[in-house]
Amino acid sequence: MHRTQTEYEDNLTFKVFIFQFCNFYSSIFYIAFFKGKFVGYPGNYTRVFGLRTEECANGGCLVELAQQLLVIMVGKQMINNCQEVAVPKIKQFIQRWKLKGSLGDRESTRWEEDYQLVENEGLFEEYLEMILQFGFITIFVASFPLAPLFALLNNWIEIRLDGAKYLCEVRRPVAERAEDIGIWFSILDAIAQIAVVSNAFLIAFTSDFLSRALYKYKHDGVLDGYTNYTLSTSPEGSMSQTCRYLDYRDENGAYKVTYFQLLALKLLFVIVFEHFVFGVGKLIDMAVPDVPESLEIKIKREAYMAKQALSELQA
């Protein structure tokens, strides 16, 4: 048993968020960091339960990831907005149908009309929806930079829809005092830190940004021959005819020196990128106080006056 209601709500919120996080993000993490990374090479393909592991499309996994996020940020949010409009109206229709005839033919009073509205279910679902959206536009923003724009447009529409819902479809909520937004703040902070690491790995390992940079560094800043540079030749006798595949291997299937050079560059980029972003975030956190100085002075003044009044009362 939890000692307080706040502790119970925080634990419940965290458990529901973890479930929804795995439900919504598992496929995207798979495309971003696992799909096409353990395929093997002709003659020695990696197999799981007798089946070859899935490869990325010709455009690369980054394109697939962008398409997946486009579907989520546009299609899923359109469906959610339709539900925001339709579900309260359906619930209100059912509520009025259940209460039909209980009031007789007389005119309803104000409180009786309010009773026919849908019961307010709190802000938990609204918070959860916003937190999941925040995750989509931060954790994978390197693969789909337009995600924040679609989120902004969606939120502008949803503000109007929620306003109409709370004014016309839902009963007035009972006000409750709260110190802050609870564990949601810790979840937001955790997502922001995951986003830094995730975007570093997306740029380094999923995109071809660093491979292009390394090739340009070795070839006087030009990309002539880059496609051939990224392709390897299948080992002799592994296929009915010679083929080329995307990897840095020699004719025996062993990794070339270029592969290890690129791997070292990718790991170095991840370390430098995340330390730089975390450092900038820390500087901003130090430069911008959580409580403005003017408000802090007023809080201290109020506490001092309360102490003075208490001392005069005791005297």
Image (spheres, helix red, strand yellow):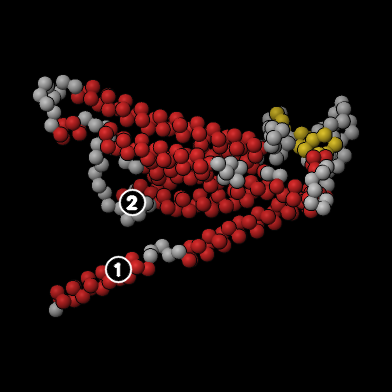
Q: Answer yes or no: is residue 21 visible.
A: no
Please state which amino acid type lies under the numbered disc 1.
Answer: Lys
Residue at 37% over, 32% down: 84
Picture coordinates of residue 164, whole percent (x, y): 31, 35
- Marking on residue 246: none
Residue at 10% over, 24% down: 106
Give the alpha-carbon distance from disc 1 to disc 2, as whole Å.
28 Å
| Horizontal side of residue 267 vs 103, given as left or right | right
Q: Which element is circle 2 on?
A: helix
Picture coordinates of residue 266, whole percent (x, y): 70, 52
Residue at 31% over, 35% down: 165
Which residue carries the number 1 mark?
Answer: 298
Given contact means CB atoms under 8 Å apart, are the residues at marks 1 and 2 in contact?
no
Picture coordinates of residue 296, whole percent (x, y): 34, 68
Foreground pick, 199 / 267: 199
Which residue carries the number 2 mark?
Answer: 6
